Image (cartoon, rainbow, N blue to C red):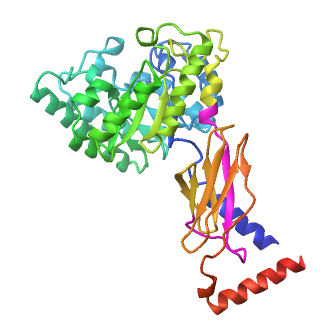
Amino acid sequence: MLIVSYFLLLAKTEAANQQTSLWPVTSIDTMKYSRDPSRDPNIKKVIPPMVAEVAKLGPNHISIATPYDEEFYPVLKAWVTEARKNHLKVWFRGNFSSWEGWFGYPRFTDVNQHHILTKAFIEKHPDLFEDGDIFTPVPEAENGAMGDPRGSDQKTAQFNQFLIDSYNNCQEAFKTIHKNVQCGYFSTNGDIARQVLTDDTVKKIGNIVAIDHYVGSPEQMVQDIDFLTQKFPGAKIVLGEFGAPIPDINGPMTQQQQADFIDKLLQKLYEKRDQVIGLNYWVLSGGSTTILNQDGSERQVANVIRKYFTPPIITGFVKNEHNDGIANAQIIVNDREETMTDKNGLFRFSTIKNQPITITVKYKGYQPSTHSLTPTSDTHIKDIHLSSMTKQNQSFFYRIKLFINNLFNSIK
């Protein structure tokens, strides 16, 4: 019994490595508090409750925008410390103040200064980072020292080369401190991504196109994602910022209208999750798209985000006729291959609460098996047994094993 329990625990541990969120990266942005008031002497009092509110929404990352200047290091460290306490990975979306001239810092006159300072910052503060974090050296690079990259071929070429150099510089720095941190996710506005980025650049910065993108309708988001996936074949899309309402785009919204809009938008993004691998909702508090009211209470949209960021986890075992687990069986959910079984036959995937799903299990040489359910919470499915399609070709050993197994089951 002890041995059986051990192997069951081992199987569950391995299955835990399978994706348990709808997107590999889900994040909540805190810029209005993690950057804008960084010089406020009382800011550290705000950080613990803010990070706790983010964690309650169920993302796997928190986006922190505190500048990387040494002046602000204690504040950044406080944010990161609270993130770790709440079991969150960090998406670093800050920058040096001189990139855009924040807090009275003079703008860089040479963009190479940015590379030098970034590498030095990472190597000086290895304690800030954990495997699985994301580090964006320059969010919305078009707003900073280089200026708008449109208008000439030279500007466009310089912008693309800067992103490539920044990515490589970041990679080298994290290699030096032996941390597995994802570099890049260079968010730009949608126009820059469409008009300036090249396919060569995208491939050299991780094959990811990140956009800070706000839309008037969920359908518009789908169209824009489709455009980018066609322009950059094989690239994955990350929404560095999204949310609603933006007054100039969406006009005013009631709490209910905001919740309904974000629900429809996230449903569309769920349907596009083969292309979209990351989402960062902007913003937790302090902007028109806020999740929290001024008194700190949650708006209706909070439950919508939680619905998609804390989805039910479906698990189960796939076995053959004599109760052995089948490795590498396909788990197809609503006509999409969601995952495969591990070496013990265990599968694990996430889905949306209260939405009916059909699970089809396939493995070469066996009859497919289909099951339907509407999950309201984490669900472990009863073992799924597949029947061989070619019993006449089964080996003598296989038939003996099957006979013994059937005999054992009949005795039980």
Q: Which residues are magenta?
A: 307-329
Residue 58, position as x, y percentages in the image: 62, 34
Q: Is residue 197 above or below residue 108?
A: below
Residue at the spot x=66%, y=86% of the render?
398
In this view, the residue in front, 301 or 398, is 398
Instruction: For residue 189, say whether it is visible.
Output: yes
* Quarter holding residue 363: bottom right
Farthest residue toward the right? 411
In this view, the residue in front, 199 or 162, is 199
Magenta-span inclusion, residue 232: no
Residue at the spot x=48%, y=40% of the render?
127
Farthest residue toward the bottom? 396
- Looking at the image, residue 335 sits to the left or right of residue 408; the answer is left
Magenta-span inclusion, residue 324: yes
Residue 344, position as x, y percentages in the image: 64, 68
Q: Is residue 259 above or below residue 162?
A: above
* Quarter holding residue 365: bottom right
- Looking at the image, residue 48 sits to the left or right of residue 66; the answer is right
In this view, the residue in front, 192 or 383, is 383
Residue 273, position as x, y percentages in the image: 48, 41
Q: Is residue 34 above or below residue 364?
A: above
Residue at the spot x=42%, y=20% of the render?
215
Q: Could you tell me how many numbered marks the image carries? A: 0
Residue at the spot x=72%, y=86% of the render?
401
Placement of the C terminus among the 4 image quadrants:
bottom right
Residue 230, position as x, y percentages in the image: 30, 40
Placement of the N terminus among the 4 image quadrants:
bottom right
Instruction: For residue 58, say whether it is visible.
Output: no
- Looking at the image, residue 62 sits to the left or right of residue 177; the answer is right
* Quarter holding residue 384: bottom right
